[in-house]
């Protein structure tokens, strides 16, 4: 997806719940200062939408994303247990957002891990998260046995691995690691490993390939994460490892995410809606800003993405303007103003 410079690009904007509206406003201000080409269509989802219309994912929000094929969203609250199904999962299924992109790069130096630069690409639609679950009764216990069956299709495994290799080629990455559990889940993740090596052949001489069993990968990410470049894996493993990798660079507060399909892409901060600090003006907008950086690159404005990255590095690293979660004293407004000033 690329657009000519100067073109306005329609995009759906979902402020979200909790700290969502505050960080979304901050990000929009920074993007305006950058001269980002987005033309926002504001829509509701989550608890804010429930309060407004009784529906956590209104039809007009879905219609907007269908029209723009592009959305930036703040964190949404999903009730634990009951209530309604995760909106993120619904959006992934609705728009077939098959690739979950989770880059992690060190921003604040001098932590336990330095110079981390890993991109995790997770299959988003299949595996155990297809969630085909049921109980079997024994005697008086109607829920004596819990059964879950996942599935992976060869076509989807090939598509996600191809996405990872294409990403590597476009972004000058050297190596893709296929992460699996084919020693135990021989069919479910064996098909992923097999499809992975089939696709890797097409990139021979351009991108290196290797594979790791998921538990060994988890250990190595803690002991020696620098051996990894791009990791591609199935849904459940990707969910777990992407959070582990976020921990290497300072936690979910620094983690951007993108959910990408053929016809639509949704960019988000990975962290939750943090209701405990909502309305206090202290929330950190960096994860959502980093997500908008990926969004700019996605629409072919790598030039603006690079300028934004430089501004973030300069403000947070060189000038040490940081929110409390990063050990600083800045509030949301101070950080936003500093970034705008740097971009002006």
Image (cartoon, rainbow, N blue to C red):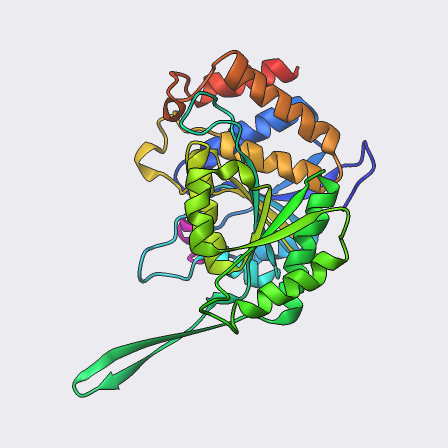
Residue 59 higher or lower than 37, as above or below = below
Answer yes or no: is residue 56 visible. Answer: no
- Specify start and end residues of the magenta stretch as a single range: 46-55
The image shows residue 298 at horizontal and vertical percentages of 70, 42
In the image, 290: left or right of 333? Answer: right
Counting every numbered tag in the picture gives: 0
Front-most of residues 73 and 1: 1
Q: Name the outermost residue toward the top.
A: 319
Q: Name the outermost residue toward the bottom.
A: 139
Magenta segment: does it hold 279?
Answer: no
Magenta segment: does it hold 51?
Answer: yes
The image shows residue 5 at horizontal and vertical percentages of 81, 32
The image shows residue 344 at horizontal and vertical percentages of 66, 15
Answer yes or no: is residue 323 visible. Answer: yes
Residue 214 higher or lower than 292, as above or below = below
Q: Residue at x 22, y 86 (%)?
A: 138
> In the picture, residue 110 is in which quadrant?
top left
Q: Name the outermost residue toward the right.
A: 4
In the image, 36: left or right of 320? Answer: right
In the image, 214: left or right of 156? Answer: left
The image shows residue 263 at horizontal and vertical percentages of 70, 56
């Amino acid at each position: 997806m690329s657009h000519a410079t100067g073109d306005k690009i329609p995009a759906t904007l979902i402020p979200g719940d909790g700290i969502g509206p505050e960080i979304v406003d901050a990000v929009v201000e920074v993007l305006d200062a950058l001269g980002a080409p987005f033309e926002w269509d504001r829509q509701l989802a989550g608890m804010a939408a429930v309060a407004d219309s009784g529906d956590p994912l209104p039809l007009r929000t879905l219609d907007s994303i269908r029209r723009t094929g592009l959305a930036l969203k703040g964190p949404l609250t999903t009730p634990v247990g009951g209530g309604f199904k995760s909106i993120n999962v619904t959006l992934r299924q609705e728009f077939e957002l098959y690739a979950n992109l989770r880059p992690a790069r060190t921003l604040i130096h001098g932590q336990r891990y330095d110079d981390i630069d890993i991109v995790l690409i997770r299959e988003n639609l299949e595996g155990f998260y297809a969630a085909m679950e049921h109980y079997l009764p024994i005697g008086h216990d109607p829920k004596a046995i819990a059964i879950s069956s996942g599935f992976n299709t060869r076509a989807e495994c090939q598509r996600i691995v191809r996405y990872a290799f294409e990403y590597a080629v476009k972004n000058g990455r050297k190596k893709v690691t296929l992460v699996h559990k084919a020693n135990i889940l021989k069919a479910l993740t064996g098909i992923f490993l097999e499809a992975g090596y089939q696709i890797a052949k097409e990139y021979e001489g351009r991108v290196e390939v290797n594979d790791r069993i998921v538990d060994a990968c988890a250990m190595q990410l803690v002991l020696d994460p620098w051996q990894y470049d791009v990791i591609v894996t199935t849904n459940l493993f990707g969910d777990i490892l992407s959070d582990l990798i976020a921990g290497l660079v300072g936690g979910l507060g620094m983690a951007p995410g993108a959910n990408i399909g053929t016809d639509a892409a949704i960019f988000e901060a990975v962290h939750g809606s943090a209701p405990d600090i909502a309305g206090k003006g202290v929330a950190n907008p960096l994860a959502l800003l980093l997500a908008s950086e990926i969004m700019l690159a996605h629409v072919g404005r790598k030039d603006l993405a690079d300028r934004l990255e430089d501004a973030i590095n300069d403000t947070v690293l060189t000038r040490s303007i940081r929110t409390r979660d990063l050990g600083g004293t800045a509030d949301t407004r101070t950080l936003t103003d500093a970034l705008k000033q740097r971009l002006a």
